[in-house]
Image (spheres, rainbow, N blue to C red):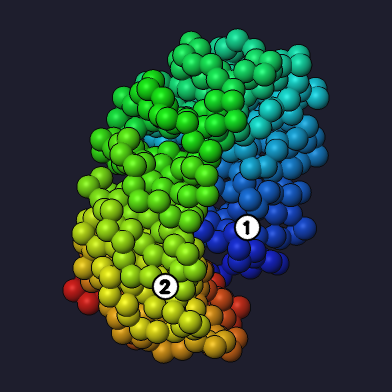
């Protein structure tokens, strides 16, 4: 283990505030000294404040900037890269949003009992209150939109310009297309739901489903669920499907390449999946989170209820029946060549990979299976009695009292697998089956682009930033 103790000299450090930047180059945490709070970045202390909102501390996506909400005598302010912005009566948390390119920061402030959206330090117009949600940037970082009340009605504000007012605006709205060229949202006027695209109403119906509409990844296609009387339809590129009694939560979905659209529906007591307008086999139920596409869009899978049993359907072919299927199943590997899910027979669970059941255990951790980037390796957490273990490539590892949340993880080249485990009061990092030294506390694990494993740990009241340089790697 290669590490260095942080000689902090602080009265207190909040372990849950310890985080790496996305690029793994920087680390930050919240500390207290002389009855004041401060944020420490790479052992450099920031300015002291009466209070800092732990949940607001965030790195920009590129890891080059850090922002957070702090309180001082006059009110709240946003501190970015150590410099405090204008004061507001309050800044709701969490409300800090970096643009995807890390060049812009937006947040919401309360001023004179009104709300104002601030971008790059410049306040926009004041409104009575937010309806819900936070400012949203387009993926290309060129546009920003949010929902605000003006008087008694809400409107969508795009790049500082409010759209027309409606009686209501749907949850999760507005939405940018992935390429940033379009903005869509669902609104209500009276009892009618209206779909608004780029400021123009394009459809009117009895209701539009929560979470809808959705763009294809290239932004060229649009799909949403709509209510027609007591029935539901799916509208794809302006064309409505037949009417159904119900449509699955989270549906419909596009494949990543935008060539296919799928959704689950109910007719009477039976559920089935519709793929590109083609009706699949009818079952007694379909699991939430199904269907899913493989990353290349060439395959589709979903878990269903069939009588007293459950099974997984891949490309229209039904797999073996089980007494239960793990929630959130199934999972495709990144190449789309393999599919895995947890299946239960009686009281025993097993991970099923390409139809073949693996090691039997008392339970499977809810995160489910984790594939390496090339799809050749698989790891997952399991439970036997009150003990936990990790299974890698079909081989069960040693048992522990606890497995670190979010683990196991693969290095990006797939050569190494790591996870955190606890035995008694001590934590360990297990890399490729080898158990490291005892630790008092362990933060999230992260492989960088070079395959070096990094994490934060505490041992005997000293804070360490640990780097494991694995075999065949130089750093």
Q: Position of residue 228 (x, y in %)?
A: 55, 25
In this image, 392 relative to 210: left or right? left
In this image, 232 relative to 124: left or right? left
Residue 431 sits above or below residue 355 on the image:
below
**Frontmost residue, 197 versus 179:** 197
Residue 423 sits above or below residue 157 on the image:
below
**Frontmost residue, 391 versus 336:** 336
Circle on res. 103: none
- Quadrant (top left, top right, bottom left, bottom right) of the C terminus: bottom left
Instruction: Say which residue appears at 44% left-offset and 62% top-offset.
Output: 306
In this image, 129 relative to 376: left or right? right
How packed mark 1 is, by other alpha carbons closer than 10 Å (few <14, some 14-19, many 20 or more), is: many
Q: CA distance from mark 1 to mark 2?
A: 48 Å
Circle on res. 30: 1
- For this orientation, the residue located farthest to the front is 268
Q: Position of residue 134 (x, y in %)?
A: 60, 33
As helix, strand or loop, the secondary structure at mark 1 comes to strand
Instruction: Say which residue appears at 33% left-offset and 54% top-offset.
Output: 301
Dot in front, 1 or 2? 2
Q: Position of residue 30 (x, y in %)?
A: 62, 57
Look at mark 2 in the image and give the residue it sits on.
Answer: 322
Q: Are marks 1 and 2 in contact (CB under 8 Å)?
A: no
Q: Quadrant of residue 310?
A: bottom left
Tell which circle, 1 or 2, labels the residue nearer the N-terminal end. 1
As helix, strand or loop, the secondary structure at mark 2 comes to loop
Instruction: Say which residue appears at 63% left-offset and 50% top-offset.
Output: 55
- Quadrant (top left, top right, bottom left, bottom right) of the N terminus: bottom left
Q: Quadrant of residue 71?
A: top right
Q: Position of residue 269 (x, y in %)?
A: 52, 49
**Frontmost residue, 141 versus 402:** 402
């Amino acid at each position: 283990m290669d590490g260095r103790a942080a000689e902090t000299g602080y009265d207190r450090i909040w372990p849950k505030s310890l985080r790496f930047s996305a690029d793994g180059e920087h680390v930050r945490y919240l500390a207290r000294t002389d009855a004041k709070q401060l944020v420490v970045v790479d052992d450099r202390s920031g300015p002291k404040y009466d209070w800092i909102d732990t949940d607001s501390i965030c790195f920009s996506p590129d890891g080059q900037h850090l922002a957070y909400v702090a309180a001082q005598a006059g009110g709240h302010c946003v501190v970015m890269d150590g410099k405090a912005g204008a004061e507001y009566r309050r800044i709701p948390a969490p409300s800090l949003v970096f643009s995807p390119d890390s060049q812009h920061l937006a947040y919401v402030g309360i001023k004179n009992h009104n709300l104002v959206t601030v971008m790059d330090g410049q306040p926009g117009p004041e409104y009575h209150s937010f309806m819900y949600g936070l400012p949203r940037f387009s993926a290309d970082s060129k546009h920003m939109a949010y929902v605000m009340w003006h008087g008694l009605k809400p409107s969508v504000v795009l790049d500082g310009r409010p759209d027309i007012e409606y009686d209501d605006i749907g949850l999760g709205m507005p939405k940018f297309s992935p390429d940033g060229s379009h903005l869509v949202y669902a609104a209500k006027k009276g009892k009618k739901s209206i779909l608004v695209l780029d400021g123009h109403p394009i459809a009117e119906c009895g209701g539009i489903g929560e979470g809808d509409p959705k763009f294809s990844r290239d932004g060229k296609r649009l799909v949403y669920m709509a209510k027609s009387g007591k029935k539901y339809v799916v509208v794809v590129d302006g064309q409505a499907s037949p009417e159904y009694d119900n449509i699955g939560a989270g549906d419909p979905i596009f494949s990543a390449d935008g060539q296919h659209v799928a959704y689950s529906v109910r007719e009477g007591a039976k559920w089935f999946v519709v793929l590109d307008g083609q009706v699949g086999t009818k079952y007694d139920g379909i699991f939430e989170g199904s269907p899913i596409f493989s990353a290349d869009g060439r395959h589709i899978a979903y878990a269903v209820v069939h009588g007293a049993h459950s099974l997984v359907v891949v490309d229209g072919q039904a797999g073996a029946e089980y007494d239960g299927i793990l929630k959130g199943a199934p999972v495709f590997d990144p190449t789309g060549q393999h599919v895995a899910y947890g299946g239960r027979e009686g009281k025993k669970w097993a991970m099923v990979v390409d139809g073949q059941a693996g090691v039997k255990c008392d339970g499977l951790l809810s995160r489910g299976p984790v594939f390496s980037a090339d799809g050749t390796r698989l790891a997952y957490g399991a439970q036997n009695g009150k003990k936990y273990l990790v299974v890698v490539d079909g081989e069960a590892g040693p048992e522990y009292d606890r497995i670190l949340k979010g683990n196991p993880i693969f290095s990006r080249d797939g050569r190494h697998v790591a996870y955190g485990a606890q035995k008694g009061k001590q934590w360990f990092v297990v890399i490729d089956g080898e158990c490291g030294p005892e630790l008092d506390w362990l933060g999230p694990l992260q492989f960088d682009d070079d395959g070096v494993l990094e994490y934060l740990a505490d041992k005997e009241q000293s804070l360490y930033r640990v780097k494991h340089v694995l075999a065949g790697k130089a750093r």
